[in-house]
Amino acid sequence: MTDHGSFHPIERFVEGADPVLFVFATDTPAQRQALHDEMVARLSAIAQLSETMTYSGIESPDARSHQGILECVAILSRDVRGLLEASFRAGP
């Protein structure tokens, strides 16, 4: 690894598929803190979106009216999972 870190693959959700997602591997305390801060920010966004859906009382004009918000929660959740997996793995 260099002072700038390196990239390494994370396993996909599909068994047997080649790894395709990459996360920055950290070398310094500042980089590890930045990764931690990013995870916290995404978790906070998930919580805020979830609370919005729970408490806002949004009326649903059709079955897929909230699909965009649910997709955001799913994407952020996958991001956090990938960042957590990467933060616990030793680099090359």
Image: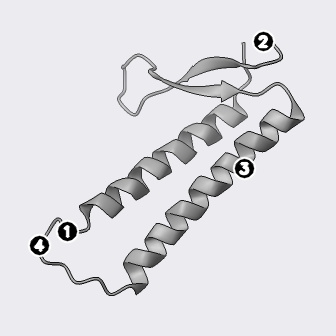
Spot occupied by residue 10 in the image (x, y as percentages of width and height):
53, 26
Seen in the image, is 82 located left or right of residue 20? Answer: right
Residues tagged 4 and 3 counted as in contact (Cβ below 8 A): no
Using a 10 Å C-alpha cutoff, classify the residue at mark 1 as few (fewer than 14 neighbours), some (14 to 19) or many (20 or more).
few
Q: What residue sits right under mark 3 in the picture?
A: 37
| C-alpha gap between disc 4 and disc 2 | 51 Å
Give me the C-alpha separation between circle 2 and circle 1: 46 Å
Q: Earlier in the sequence, mark 4 or mark 3?
A: 3
Q: Which mark is residue 38?
A: none
The type of residue carrying mark 2 is Met
Seen at 78% across and 12% down, the residue is 1
For the residues marked 2 and 3, what is the alpha-carbon distance in whole angstroms?
A: 22 Å
The residue at which mark 4 appears reads as 62
**Residue under the point 33% across and 61% down:** 70
Tag 4: amino acid? Asp
**Along the polypeptide, which appears first: circle 2 or circle 3?**
2
Q: In the picture provided, is 39 more to the left or to the right than 13? A: right
Mark 1 vs 4: CB contact within 8 A: yes
Q: Which mark is residue 65?
A: 1
Residue identifier under label 2: 1
Q: Amino acid at mark 1?
A: Ser
> Circle 2: is it few (<14), some (14-19), or many (20+) Cα within 10 Å?
few
Decide: few, some or many residues near mark 3? Use Cα within 10 Å; few <14, some 14-19, many ≥20: few
